[in-house]
Image (cartoon, rainbow, N blue to C red):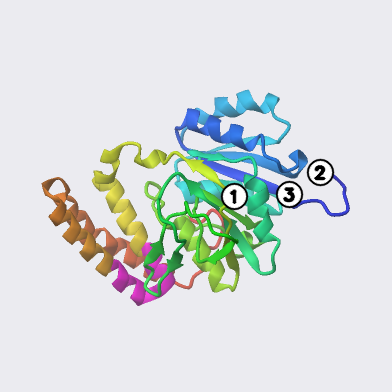
Amino acid sequence: MNQTDNPKPFVSVVIPTRARREMLRICIESLLCQDYPRDRYEVIVVEDGTSDGAGVVEELTPKSSVPLRYLQIAHSGAATARNVGLAHSNADIVAFIDDDGQATREWISELVKPLLQEGVAGSGGRVSPEYPDALLRAQVSSDGDVKWSGFNVVVPEPQEVDFVAGGNMAFWRKYLVEVEGLDAGFTRRGSWREDTDLHIRLRKKGYRHIYNWRAQIGHRAARWLNPVERLRPGLVWAMTRDDAYFRTKNFGWAGAAGAMRANAIDIKSRIVYGVANFALVFVHMFAWIPGVWQGLRKKNRGLGTLFNP
């Protein structure tokens, strides 16, 4: 690290990954050519249950002037992978990008800028080319309903929001430690709402989050490259359960009622859309129940440890 009078905050960029060798390579390469000082950031790759990324990191490390680390864990989900990266970082700021993201050259610099404001715990930026909405909306209602426009919105000035995109976000590490990291109680397959849950817990402590569109990534949306993925009962179950868990643990009975209403709407949609979706009606009928149960059990309780299951 440079011993200057006012050094920039040191940043750890954590990439959770699973079996996406070539996407991971593109992601890492975009991070190794940032305009942020080379001695003020590092890249930590955390592979969740596979080993595809080991060779990529081994190949790129000798070519990089930026420290590049590789960690491997048993398949545990995105929240645990992010927590492992957080636990192995001693940086001032921890940034997260998904392995299917490609950062612009100014990404780290633009994530850091909002964090220098008073009371700001987290920042995030534009996820392109998804979502055509022109007006930015990122709010969570009192029953846990997530109202958002997507994060492909250009706004004149950085704007305060309830949450930012999980694959394009950064936080002061001390605040992440204060709330005991991400909650690993979300399903390892879905990991749906685990990033929004983190933002809500920080906001309950009075911390702010800023959206700065100039912190841009290209997102290749690997989860949805196969359109059949949206119809797989296991994944739909995981996402439905996770949404109910998120709502209930943060908003109590109001969140549980919100989960029931959301699934009633989903059931109606499945029936309307046709026979191909009809089997998933039964998933929506029941998957929210374990989420509500676990959410009520964990409501107002600490996570205990960064690695809490």
Residue 109 placed where, x, y %? Answer: 68, 49
The disc placed on residue 289 is: none
**In this view, the mark in front (1 or 2):** 1
Q: CA distance from mark 1 to mark 2?
A: 24 Å
Residue 256 is covered by the magenta coloring = yes
Q: Image point 55% across, 42% down: which residue? A: 15
Q: Image point 30% across, 67% down: which residue? A: 259
Q: Read off the residue under disc 3.
A: 10
Q: Is residue 217 left or right of residue 105?
A: left
Q: Image point 51% across, 58% down: which residue? A: 164
Q: CA distance from mark 3 to mark 1?
A: 17 Å
* Type of amino acid under label 3: Phe
Q: CA distance from mark 3 to mark 2?
A: 8 Å
* Residue 84 can be seen in this image: no
Q: Magenta span covers which residues?
A: 245-259
Residue 60 placed where, x, y %? Answer: 63, 26
